[in-house]
Every structure is written in structure tokens, then in C-alpha cells.
Image (spheres, rainbow, N blue to C red):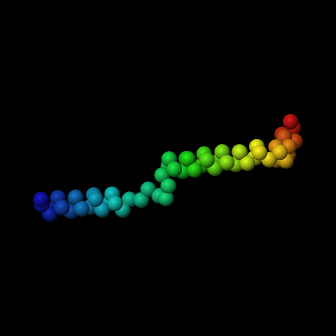
């Protein structure tokens, strides 16, 4: 293996290992957002005072 081949191989591995994808993947962020939204809606619909307040605001 020539010196140039070793440099290219080393750099491609180093750049790949240095690349960060972030704390959460896009699938994990989507799942977290979905679960949080479902939790908020579940809490909202189990509270009769909130349902009445929003119902009066919406005119229903």
C-alpha cells in the first residue's frame, strides 16, 4: 500500500468516525414528539374543566 493510499484510507475512516448525528436520530425525535403529543392530549381529555373551558372558547 502506498503512502497516498494509507492517507486516503485513514482520512476516510477518521472523517466517518468524527461525524456526529446529534443526540437523537430523526426517528427517535419523531417518536418522542408523537408520544409527548399523545400524552398532552390524553391529559387534556381526562380533565373536565379544561374540556369545558375550551368548549366555551370554541363556541360549542
- On the image, the x and y values in percent for residue 16 come to 33, 57
Q: Nearer the viewer, residue 60 or 5?
A: 60
Quick check: can you spot residue 54?
no
- On the image, the x and y values in percent for residue 46 come to 77, 45
Q: Residue furthest left?
A: 1
- On the image, the x and y values in percent for residue 29 come to 54, 50
Quadrant in which residue 41 is drawn:
top right
Identity of the residue drawn at 44% across and 56% down: 21
Identity of the residue drawn at 83% across and 45% down: 48
Classify residue 5 as left or right of residue 22: left
Identity of the residue drawn at 34% across and 60% down: 17
Identity of the residue drawn at 61% across and 47% down: 35
Q: Nearer the viewer, residue 19 or 34?
A: 34
Q: Nearer the viewer, residue 59 or 43?
A: 43
Q: How many marks?
A: 0
Classify residue 46 as left or right of residue 24: right
Classify residue 24 as left or right of residue 19: right
Quadrant in which residue 8 is drawn:
bottom left
Quick check: can you spot residue 53?
yes
Q: Residue furthest top?
A: 60
- On the image, the x and y values in percent for residue 58 come to 83, 40
Does 19 appear above or below 60?
below
Quadrant showing the N terminus: bottom left
Quadrant showing the C terminus: top right
Classify residue 26 as left or right of residue 1: right
Amino acid at each position: 500500500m502506498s503512502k497516498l493510499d494509507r492517507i486516503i484510507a485513514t482520512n476516510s475512516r477518521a472523517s466517518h468516525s468524527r461525524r456526529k448525528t446529534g443526540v437523537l436520530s430523526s426517528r427517535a425525535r419523531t417518536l418522542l414528539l408523537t408520544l409527548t403529543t399523545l400524552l398532552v392530549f390524553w391529559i387534556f381529555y381526562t380533565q373536565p374543566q379544561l374540556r369545558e373551558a375550551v368548549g366555551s372558547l370554541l363556541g360549542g
